[in-house]
Image (spheres, helix red, strand yellow):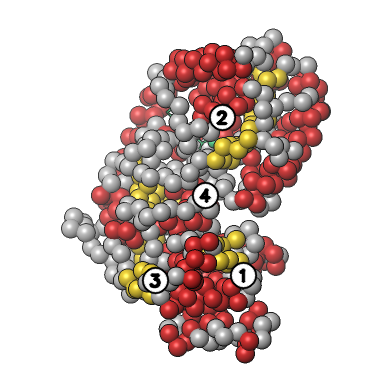
Amino acid sequence: MVQQVDKVVTDTLKGKLKEIFGYSQFRGDQEVIIQNILLGKNTFVIMPTGAGKSLCYQLPALVSDGLTIVISPLIALMKNQVDQLTAFGINAQFLNSTLTKAEMTRVKTDALDGSLKLLYIAPESLTKEDNLDFLKKVKISFVAIDEAHCISEWGHDFRPEYRRIYGIIENIGKLPIIALTATATPKVQQDIRKNLQMEEAETFKSSFNRKNLYYEIRPKKDIKKQLIRYIRNNKGKSGIVYCLSRKTVEEVAELLNVNDVRALPYHAGLDANTRMANQDAFLNEECDVIVATIAFGMGIDKPDVRFVIHYDVPKSLEGYYQETGRAGRDGLEGNCLMFYSYDDIQKLEKFNKDKTVTERDNARHLLNEMVAYSTLGVCRRRQLLSYFGEYLEKDCGYCDNCNKPTEKIKVQEDVILILKSVALTEQRFDADHIADLLTATDNQYVKSYEHDQLEVFGKGLELNESRDYWVSAIRQLVILNYLEKDIENYGVIRLGEKGAKYLNDPYPITLQKDHNFDEEEVKPEDDDKEAVNGNGSAHAYDEALLGMLKALRKKVAKEKN
Ligand code: ADP
Ligand code: MG
Ligand code: ZN
């Protein structure tokens, strides 16, 4: 019986996918996920940005009886999806404080008479008494909780109101829940499951490997020239340039404009209308490049972004992954370039001054990971995936480190020494502390062990003097899976299964030398034209203004039609 239902459902689903969305294939686990929620089971979806999470609740909403509630953290996100669904001819609306009384009444009437299929709502609105009273009268199919990591304090966008969602759902009635997130760390996942009381929920986690993205890091020297050169080589393509501060955003946008690049700024300091207009201009291809702070991007669905540039070093690998993830969402070319300098790291450290001790430790830890990712000579993809708890068997062959490897070194004695240290310290140290131990750097952790009992104390100095070398080697052994790092537990290093075997039967392992960005040269490319500097020629500036004016007129004309 169930199987029969499945068959009918499957045929209907494929048909609807084509009929409504125009897609001929499900992507990844979409179909099983949809079936799971249609069977009324709680469902947990972890997929990277751009994988197609929305469809996992949009489609079942359409084939279910009743209304689907979609909880989403941002009005911009809701608006985006509602606009899209409306364009597909679906009755979807949102409920938030921006609605007029008349619009509110319309939403409620449509919900009550059953014509409304999806209702987007922020948790703040969900907790409002009259909204709650109204929802109790509506037939509801299931609840989708998008960006579910907002539930967790360990996530990067914690929203306290998200913690109240479960109580409200219970209040409305016992409803199936589908929770979706692109955050992969186990601690956040556990928090979500616990908070939504869906420990038993089937979890669908897809790989975080974005095969079409090319990861690259260059030294942050002559950055203006490098940036212009890069964008000129990608002329006419869509791209995002992320900067740390609003001020830099403005400067870089202007720099690009005077260099004939159609670029617009985006940051939270601009008024809402300007932000919206600039975002639309980017989506409608009236400008090629958006220069932005991290305020830009969540929920923005432009499939053909060809490059994402980090002008400044981001605060965490999570952020970096999210932001680079906006490139190549259509599966075609996507280039991710980051400019790195240790100055940036120090700048970011300064921002942490006023934080609490725990916050500061956490921020420092995230930055440490960023430094390691940037400077290690190992395949970038292997590093990123290892950070998200995935092990990649081989180098990817499609990143800068694979393309232009740093010097290789073969080691065996060093590896044995490291693995032994991990075992001898009862797997309680992180990479830094193991390196301290090996190089006889005294600190409180190392002191907690009796040195003379630890045969490895200071032994690293005999093989290689630099502490940095040992930190790098340990990190590489993690990526190669000889060691395991517990990201949720202060980055403590444990001996993996592979590592334990290795100690019994060692062999030479190839490690990569780190990048030394102070010494790396910026290679001029052949077609390098001298870039005009930001505060440069007035003539170029006038032309840029003219160009923007033209684009604006075109936009106005389009809106009139
Ligand atoms: P996520 O929420 O996981 O970041 P989205 O739901 O915004 O991703 O989807 C990303 C893009 O993938 C959208 O442009 C969406 O229309 C597209 N998409 C989703 N499912 C499919 C599919 N089965 N076939 C083709 N495109 C799809
Ligand atoms: Mg999404
Ligand atoms: Zn690689």
Which of label 2 and label 1 is nearer to you? Answer: 1
Q: Does the image show residue 351?
A: no
Q: Are marks 2 and 1 in contact (CB under 8 Å)?
A: no
Q: Amino acid at mark 1?
A: Gln
Where's residue 295, x and y in %?
A: 54, 46
398 shown above or below 98: below
Residue furthest left in the image: 526
Evaluate if marks 2 and 3 touch, with contact meaning CB atoms under 8 Å apart: no
| Viewer-closest of 162 and 51 | 51
Q: Residues within 10 Å of mark 1 (few under 14, many from 20)?
A: some
Q: Residue at x 37, y 72 (%)?
A: 508
- Which three-letter amino acid code belongs to the residue tagged 4? Ile
Residue type (three-letter) at the residue carrying disc 3: Tyr
From the image, which quarter does the C terminus lie in? Answer: top left
Q: Nearer the viewer, residue 337 or 543?
A: 337
As helix, strand or loop, the secondary structure at mark 4 comes to loop
Reading the image, the residue beneath label 4 is: 294
User: How much space separates mark 4 and mark 3, taking CA atoms?
Assistant: 45 Å
Q: Amino acid at mark 2?
A: Ile
- Callout 2: helix, strand or loop? helix
Q: Residues within 10 Å of mark 3 (few under 14, many from 20)?
A: few
